[in-house]
Image: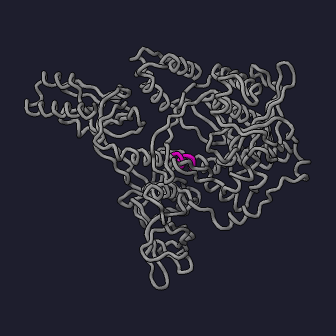
Amino acid sequence: MSKKTGKKRPAPLVKGILDITRSGMGYVMVEGSDFDVLVKPNDFNKAMHGDTVRVRIRESSGRRSEGVIEEVLERKQIEFIGDIEVNENFAFFKPDSQRPMPDFYISKSNLQGAKDHDRVVVRFLHWEKGAKKPEGEVVQVMKARDRGDLAMKEILIQSGFALEFPKEVLEETAALDPVVRESDIRTRRDCRKVLTFTIDPPDAKDFDDALSFQKLGKDEFEIGVHIADVGHYVKPGSSLDKEGYARATSVYLPDRVNPMLPEKISNELCSLRPYEDKYTFSVIFQINSKGKVKDYWLGKTVIHSDHRFTYDEVQDIIEKKSGKYGEELLVLNQVAKALRKERFKNGAINFSSTEVKFKLDETGKPLGIVVKESKDAHKLIEEFMLLANRTVAAHVARVKINKKPIPFPYRIHDTPEEEKLKPFAAFAKKFGYTFDMNNESEVAASFNKLLHDVHGKPEQHVLEQLGIRTMAKAVYTQENIGHYGLGFTYYCHFTSPIRRYPDVMVHRILEQVISGMVVPDEKMDEKCTHCSTKERSAMEAERAGNKYKQVEFMLDKLGEDMEGVISGVASFGFWVETVNEKCEGLVSVRDLSEYDDFRHDDTDYALVGLRTGKRFRMGDKIEIKLVAANLEKRQLDFEWIPGLDFLKEKAVHKKLTPQKNNSVKRHHRSSKRKKS
């Protein structure tokens, strides 16, 4: 009650994401808070799982707040996959979902040729007030060439990414002018006569960055980082722009790319292909061989790439110290190494990452695994992209309007959480590595010392993986706190506007800053949250796609013995990554019960046998057998193969009957024979 009016105050409204359980009950996870709001099915008000909603909290006498959804602010998913039932004048679509979902009404004009019981993709159109069902349209009849193709499409749709671009987006793209006009060149810095080249993977088509190089003096160079000027083609408020924002990122699955923008833009108009004039947005540095930036210039340019390199080609030139543009590449590599050294000196953390890719046949079936190592050629590009990103962020950060920073999508990375760092430091100490946790810089220095000292040792993999897990997730926000992992005070994403929408936002704001005509974006927080959410969805889809291909690859290896490394531990079992195939599966604690009663020791990242003391600790190498591969669930199941030492020790404990002990020995011998 209000003391002044005596009227009851309206219940508070909060914003969050609706999570619908399999039972049908809903919980809205409130932004910026640890609590959630219970929402009953009758109070969903046309919201579906994953939607961002505004919910009104009701009075509640229980421990949990209850509420009713007032408004759907953003749909997580607008395309769905499932089966259609076609009647004489209309149809109903039943989406595939493990959670309760309404059927969709499909009018006859929106069937697109779909027939009864077809498997289809349906796009959500609207859900009118008073209507019991949402209305949709068929956008694709699924005629997948194989099971794997269908699985990849389902992963994309379930993660909230559309398979096709809307008609109006494709029409708008088709109308774009592909010619580089003289009138546009006159408004830009002309860099076409400066040596310029791209360095990318061999299968890349969207070359969104290029480097230019020219010598200015004895130890002074002009190095340009040129980024595709997506903003020249994608205008604010256009259908292209709205679709790019809705997707927010390209999604990279093992056998395909689901692009943020149509391929005419990503692979043609904006791709910095060799021997073609292209519009770019550039950061051009005056820099010496020690990586000291003496000056820089920011602005719109036009370039002409003289050559397209692959990473392997550049690596070969670096190692042999000769080749096409070898002198220039060796200077670029020298500068990149100096930038990298300075970065680590200033607090960046040197986590190494190993990229695992599948060798696929023409149908997308995995034939093998390729482990890709990051070499000097990759690090060369990485350092110049990092330099451009932080230079742009620092430049914009200096601009104030009414003494306030302008809204800008910084890429931030928070410091490690103490509750994650403490158990990791205690675990590392067991291997003889100490951590100084007095302040952020000492933590970073301790990480780098550990990563250096552990290199090549048996515990390297486990400590690297656990170290990464202590780190916070990088996100987009206008509240800049710096990037802890990179050791930068200011950082943003500027260098990949073809595949990341935040980069498009950065380009537009930077253009305003350069022109002196800044219009603050009042929705910056909302846009940053959206882009961070879509980035997480893309990462989840990519993990699911990789997991599917892992299981598909392992199907013909059922029953085989393998060597693996324990990659994670929980109370219900432990995960193992195979050494040769780099595929991960679970050993269930249920299957270990015949050997001992195992309990989870979370301080030691281990499962421990209560009777034998046998420990399965993260990072341990063990022998396993592949016993199940489930494509639908994307799961691999392993069984542990006990060694003779354990069996002898167990026999001493007299916890197995002689008959059972013999059966275990026979299992061990048969496993060994199969392996040999």
Is residue 236 found left or right of 570 in the rendered image?
A: right
Location of residue 174 (image quadrant): bottom right
Q: Which residues are magenta?
A: 534-540
Residue 442 x/y as whole percent? 56, 18
Residue 560 x/y as whole percent? 30, 39
Residue nearer the viewer, 61 or 456: 456
Residue nearer the viewer, 410 or 326: 326
Residue 674 x/y as whole percent? 25, 35
Residue 284 x/y as whole percent? 81, 34
Quadrant in which the C terminus appears: top left
Is residue 665 found left or right of 537 in the rendered image?
A: left
Is residue 350 found left or right of 649 in the rendered image?
A: right
In this rendering, the answer to whether 518 lies above or below 469 is: below
- Tell me if residue 1 can be seen: no
Q: Residue furthest left?
A: 658
Q: Residue at x 44, y 19 (%)?
A: 457
Is residue 319 found left or right of 398 in the rendered image?
A: left
In this rendering, the answer to whether 61 lies above or below 215 is: below
In this rendering, the answer to whether 197 lies above or below 446 is: below
Q: Residue at x 62, y 53 (%)?
A: 259
Q: Residue furthest bottom?
A: 88
Q: Is residue 603 magenta?
A: no
Q: Main secondary structure of the magenta part?
A: helix
Q: Is residue 535 magenta?
A: yes
Q: Residue at x 65, y 50 (%)?
A: 527
Q: Residue at x 64, y 45 (%)?
A: 204
